[in-house]
Amino acid sequence: MKYLLPALLALTIWSACKDKNDDPAPSNPPCNCKEDYLYLGTVNHFVSVPTAFTPDGDGINDLFRAFRVDSAAIQPGSFLMTVTSGNDAILFQTNDPNNAWDGMTLGGMVVDPGKYYVSLRYNDYNGQLVDTCNCISLFRVNSQGCINTDSATYYFEDQMDWNTGQAVYTTHQQICP
């Protein structure tokens, strides 16, 4: 018993530090991060978002935004998009579906590459509340002029067909070999 308490304390401290240093996302993420990209509403009226962007000023995928495929899908004045970090700090928030996040905090600081959470809330064309969220990955171009991704599939804005919300094109981002 005299060794059990110190061992449990050490395990608890190691576990807390490991989560804090190795994975900035909380152990129970607020969003479903396994979706490739998000469909909201019905087949005919929906909003979709890409799952990655690269705010590096090269003119390719520099902004993160929701796609409004059909303006009738969202009741005017009901839209709210919020981007948060793993510690729930609000990095970007807008009630205008045409606004986009540029990878900066509300205070104008550059955000580190990583996974962030985007929540979308609006009333659809039937008055039904849509309140959902998903994850977005922010990448930065490295010294070789490409972006490093893990084995997951990411969808960038330049892959999306604005009429359908589907990812049908090849991205113009250079992915590292």
Image (cartoon, rainbow, N blue to C red):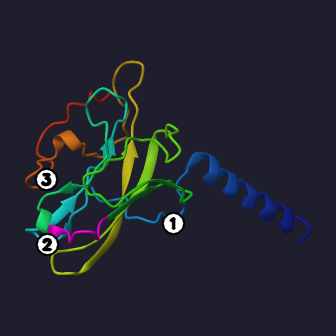
The answer to whether marks 1 and 2 mark residues whose Cβ atoms lie closer than 8 Å is no
- The secondary structure making up most of the magenta span is loop
Q: 52 and 69: which one is in front?
A: 69
Q: Amino acid at mark 1?
A: Asn
Judged from this view, the residue extending furthest toward the top is: 144
Mark 1–mark 2 distance (CA, rounded to whole Å): 28 Å
The answer to whether marks 3 and 1 mark residues whose Cβ atoms lie closer than 8 Å is no
Expressed as whole percent of the image width and height from the top left, the position of residue 169 reads 12, 40
Judged from this view, the residue extending furthest toward the front is: 77
Tell whether position 63 is magenta.
no
Expressed as whole percent of the image width and height from the top left, the position of residue 157 reads 22, 43
Q: Which mark is residue 28?
A: 1
The secondary structure type at the circle numbered 2 is: loop
Judged from this view, the residue extending furthest toward the bottom is: 127
Mark 2 vs 3, N-terminal side:
2
Query: Looking at the rendering, in which quadrant would you find the N terminus?
Result: bottom right
Please report the residue visible at 21 percent of the width from the left and 64 percent of the height from the top: 39
Mark 1 vs 2, N-terminal side:
1
Mark 3 vs 1, N-terminal side:
1
Give the image quarter of residue 49.
bottom left
- Magenta residues span 73-79
Q: Which mark is residue 42?
A: 2
Q: Amino acid at mark 2?
A: Thr
- Which dot, 1 or 2, sits closer to the camera? 2
Query: Looking at the rendering, in which quadrant would you find the C terminus?
Result: top left
Q: State the residue position of label 3.
A: 166
Expressed as whole percent of the image width and height from the top left, the position of residue 148 reads 38, 32
Q: 86 and 154: which one is in front?
A: 86
Q: 132 and 70: which one is in front?
A: 70
Q: How many residues crowd around disc 1 within 10 Å: few (fewer than 14), some, or many (20 or more)?
A: few
- Which dot, 3 or 1, sits closer to the camera? 3
